[in-house]
Amino acid sequence: MKILSVCGSPRKGNSEAVLLRLKQLLEKKGAENEIILLREKKIERCTGCVEYCNKNLDCHKKDDMVKIFEKIRSADGYVFITPNYFKMPTGIFKDFIDRCSIFYTAQTNMSGKRAIVITVGADVEREIDVCLRNVTDNFCKTLGIPVVAKKSFRSKSELKGNYNDIFENGLNPDIEKQLEKMADELFKSLKK
């Protein structure tokens, strides 16, 4: 079972800490889990060149998304995580989403895949949930990827070098249980 985890944070912090914990939980179950940190990748913006992608069912840009497209195709499931920026995903995660439009254009059947979606932010949970819905409803649903678990976690903006803050700040007292439950949901849904 191959899981691809995509992190939309522009810095090392809460999102990456959550993905690393999920990676441990998924690998403990026997799943292979690769983490892609978008901040380390060269991803050009989508320029809406529909004359090319509609005709060729491919993207003409030759950046790091070429390899990411292959990883998306070969993965059984996904974990998508992004910080909340003005109730939306970060810019680099939005660039990733926009470039994934090739799967929509090519009418790629992704209904057999499964996803976990997580957002983190310093706002109250209902504000972070707007970002969560943007990813679940406007990205995953549009591509036909069933979301088996989703959650917003509260965090601090300033970590002061404590990359484990999301687990220690007291804002998410049941975060460990939530992540275990999410890993279970993803694993069970893909094992069927």
Image: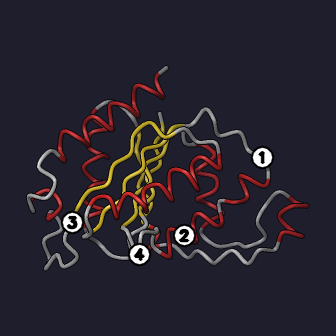
Type of amino acid under label 1: Gln
Residue 94's label in the rendered image is 2
Gap between marks 3 and 4, in whole Å? 15 Å
83 with respect to 106 (left or right): left
- Residue 76 percent across, percent down from the top left: 54, 37
Residue behind mark 1: 107
Gap between marks 4 and 1, in whole Å? 31 Å
Residue that lies at the very extreme toward the top in this rendered image? 192
Query: Is the Cβ of the residue at disc 3 closer than 8 Å to that at disc 4?
Result: no
Q: Nearer the viewer, mark 1 or mark 3?
A: 3
- Residue 6 percent across, percent down from the top left: 45, 57
Query: Is the Cβ of the residue at disc 1 closer than 8 Å to that at disc 3?
Result: no
Secondary element at tag 3 = loop
Residue behind mark 3: 155
Looking at the image, is mark 3 or mark 4 earlier in the sequence? 4
103 and 154: which is toward the camera: 154
Query: Is the Cβ of the residue at disc 4 closer than 8 Å to that at disc 2?
Result: no
Type of amino acid under label 4: Phe
In the rendered image, the vertical position of residue 171 relative to residue 90, given as above or below: above
Q: Residues within 10 Å of mark 2 (few under 14, many from 20)?
A: some
Residue behind mark 4: 86
Q: Nearer the viewer, mark 4 or mark 1?
A: 4
22 with respect to 117 (left or right): left
- Residue 105 percent across, percent down from the top left: 78, 55
Q: Identify the residue at image location x=46%, y=23%.
A: 191
